[in-house]
């Protein structure tokens, strides 16, 4: 399990700000704490490390690190499985032209670490769409299209979050009030495949214009019983009717419906691969993948592309339910509580 805190915190040396960091660390026990504070020197960073009880520290105090002055990239090793994780921490400039260099740097890194899990997060100082801003003047596509193009080109996917959709507030409470989502986590497809569970939470802003971002990465240990799904291409097999009849009408008449379904499923899997030639099997595989992705224009030959696997993973991610609101209006998490709330409602 990996827990991290990314926060563009104002005046981290102040007692209130650092006390909030300490309280969050005691509660969540972070493995990684990334503070985007531009006016700190190395001595202060070492002092923060000791007070937080963190073993290692690294910093980029307004200086260029491997030619990336808006991004700090680290390579971390998980000792339990010798797996590396690349982490890039963002502190983007306010100027749109200056951020273009950051998008180029992100693209260069993505080409170098295509086979490694990669987490990228922090303050990007730009929104992704007009839905991520409230107040002030309207947003035009040319203000964020470079960022969106960078994300798509690097095959990055946003981490689902809970909490307020806006991570930045300009501190005004009148008609000049502005809310934006400037901070976010993203991960490449290798990282999403490595971690079975990736969730983000936007915590409450306390004495700061940016919200702290909590990230939890881990492996799902609960085994969920998968429902039986009938695959359409089975019915196109020449032996389908025969296999179905022989499996269902058997001497073991006392089997339950679930056991009968399992018997038919096993028989179909045993029969199908041994019959027909390679062309038929490839066509069958394509039909299976087409049904999985629900893409009507899916063509043969694209079944092993990165696009297909991203599509399947994205669909599973959208269909997963991590939290639910019960009849009392309270949000509950965890498979047991979610299941109980759903059963009670329906």
Image (spheres, rainbow, N blue to C red):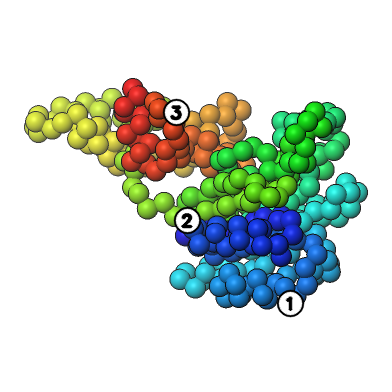
The dot on residue 43 is 1
Label 2: element kind = strand
- Find residue 82 and report its horizontal and vertical position in percent: 51, 71
* Label 2 neighbour load within 10 Å: few <14, some 14-19, many 20+: some
In-image side of 289 versus 86 (left or right): left
Give whichever of discs 2 and 1 has the lower sequence position: 1
Q: Mark 2 sits on what residue?
A: 218
Q: Quadrant of the C terminus?
A: top left
> Is residue 127 among the parts visible in the rendering?
no
Secondary structure, mark 3, is: loop
Looking at the picture, tell me which residue is in the foreground, 48 or 133: 48
Give the CA distance from mark 3 to mark 1.
48 Å
Q: 97 and 41: which one is in front?
A: 41
Cβ atoms at labels 2 and 1 below 8 Å apart: no
The image quadrant of residue 264 is top left
Q: Give the residue number, with chain letter if any, for mark 3.
A: 329
Q: Which mark is residue 11?
A: none
Question: Farthest residue toward the top?
Answer: 346
Dot placed on the residue nearer the N-terminal end, 3 or 1: 1
Q: Helix, strand, or loop for circle 1?
A: helix
Residue 198 x %, y %: 53, 50
Q: Is residue 210 above or below residue 267?
A: below
Query: Quick one: label 1, few (<14), some, or many (20+) residues within 10 Å?
Result: few
* Residue at (75, 75) in percent of width and height: 42
Residue closest to the eye, 220 or 275: 220
Q: Is residue 207 left or right of residue 140?
A: left
């Amino acid at each position: 399990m990996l827990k991290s805190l990314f926060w563009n915190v104002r005046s981290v040396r102040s007692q209130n700000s650092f006390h909030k960091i300490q309280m969050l660390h005691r509660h969540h026990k972070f493995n990684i704490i990334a503070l985007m504070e531009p006016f700190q020197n190395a001595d202060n960073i070492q002092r923060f490390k000791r007070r937080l009880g963190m073993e290692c520290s690294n910093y980029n105090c307004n200086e260029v690190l491997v030619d990336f002055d808006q991004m700090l990239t680290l390579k971390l090793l998980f000792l339990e499985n010798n797996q590396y994780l690349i982490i890039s921490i963002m502190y983007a400039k306010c100027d749109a032209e200056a951020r273009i260099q950051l998008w180029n740097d992100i693209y260069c890194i993505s080409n170098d670490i295509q086979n490694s899990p990669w987490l990228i997060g922090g303050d990007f100082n730009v929104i992704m769409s007009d839905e991520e801003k409230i107040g002030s003047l309207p947003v035009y596509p040319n203000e964020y299209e470079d960022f969106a193009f960078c994300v798509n080109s690097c095959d990055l996917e946003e981490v689902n979050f809970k909490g307020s959709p806006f991570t930045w507030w300009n501190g005004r409470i009148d008609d000049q009030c502005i809310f934006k989502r400037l901070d976010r986590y993203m991960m490449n497809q290798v990282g999403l495949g490595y971690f079975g569970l990736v969730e983000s939470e936007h915590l409450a802003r306390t004495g700061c214009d940016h919200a702290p971002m909590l990230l939890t990465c881990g492996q799902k240990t609960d085994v969920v019983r998968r429902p039986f799904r009938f695959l359409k291409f089975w019915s196109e097999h020449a032996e389908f009717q025969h296999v179905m009849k022989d499996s269902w009408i058997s001497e073991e008449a006392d089997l339950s419906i679930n056991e009968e379904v399992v018997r038919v499923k096993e028989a179909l899997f045993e029969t199908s691969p041994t019959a027909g030639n390679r062309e038929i099997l490839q066509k069958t595989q394509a039909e299976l993948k087409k049904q999985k992705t629900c893409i009507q224009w899916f063509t043969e030959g694209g079944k092993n592309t990165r696009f297909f696997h991203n599509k399947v993973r994205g669909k599973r991610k959208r269909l997963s339910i991590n939290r639910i609101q019960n009849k009392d209006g309270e949000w509950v998490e965890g498979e047991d509580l979610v299941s109980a709330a759903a059963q009670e409602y329906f």
